[in-house]
Image (spheres, grey):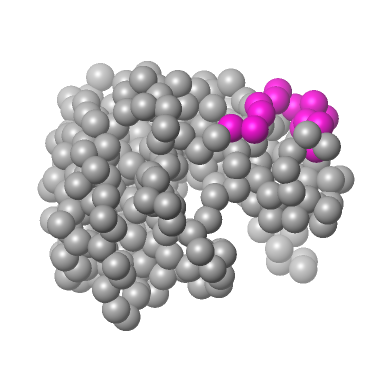
Amino acid sequence: MLNEIIDKGLMFIRYLYNKSLSEKSYPKAIKRWFKSVTGYELDLDNPKTFDEKIQYLKLYDKNPLKTTLSDKYAVREWVSKTIGVKYLIPMLGAWDSFDEIDFSNLPDRFVLKANHASGWNMIVQDKSKLDINAARRKFNRWMKTDFAFIEGFELQYHDIKRKIVAEEFIENGGNNLFDYKFYCFNGKPEFIEYIGDRLTGQPKVLFLSTDWTPEVFTDGIYPEFKELPPKPACLAELNELAGKLSAGFPFVRVDLYVLDDGSIKFGEMTFTPGSGKHSHWNPPEYATIIGDMIPLPPKN
């Protein structure tokens, strides 16, 4: 318990320090952070691995559209115009603060999201069991925090106008949810990270080619599926949608879901997976093989 309190205190101090830095200090700060979490030096002049290039893109790929597409609220309009409204998870409401939410108007199951972050979600499967006060404390803390400076300078989140969004709860049969994460390079999907068993216990993963052939690598985060999951009937459509959504970006991961009725739903656009620190590619040479797929823009 004491160690947890100390860790949270140190994290808050690092957050305040990162937030206080000037933009010209970001490269040095990212290098220091990267060395602390990966164990090796970051070469921003000649990045080679996937993680190194993610750090480079944080600093030098300054396309303002990345902020819009990282916004869980604003991205909806862009997705609607780009591929169609039918691919959006129905939204139940959006608010500027937690106390604006009228929970009596929400269904028994829903998902609350802070729009200005990655992973700041609350899955509610039984509204009668929701601790409103605990939820309020969590969202109030999130709404006061600039996610860009939590870890590794994910700067695309910095200028997002903060909101709380409620979406319909979605699932596959058996309280599961199948996640199709398309790694897209220069607008072309190159491989898929398929994740299942998110809601039933320990998530499992399998990396596949875009034709559903298992790849020879993994990223070492989750255990792998022992057997090949069923190929989705809509795989061609998934590839097409990922290509449309990723067009114009050196790298972005496009997350999609396929529900039991065959419908496809948009999850999110992820420009800095794991902030570029969670990828322990195995075999190790794939850190560079995959990094080679990212075309880097010149420094601005």
Viewer-proximal residue among 83 and 275: 83
For residue 212, what is the image quadrant? bottom left
> From this viewpoint, which residue is outermost toward the front?
261
Res 230 seen here: yes
How far across and how far down the image is residue 153, in percent? 46, 37
Residue at (59% x, 32% y) in the render:
91
Start-end of magenta stretch: 91-103
Is residue 87 located in the magenta-colored stretch of the structure?
A: no
Res 280 seen here: no
How far across and how far down the image is residue 47, in percent? 20, 44
Viewer-proximal residue among 268 and 70: 268
Location of the N terminus by quadrant is bottom right
Residue at (54% x, 27% y) in the render:
73
72 relative to 163 in the view: left or right: left
Viewer-proximal residue among 229 and 53: 229
Residue at (54% x, 68% y) in the render:
174
How far across and how far down the image is residue 191, in percent? 21, 53
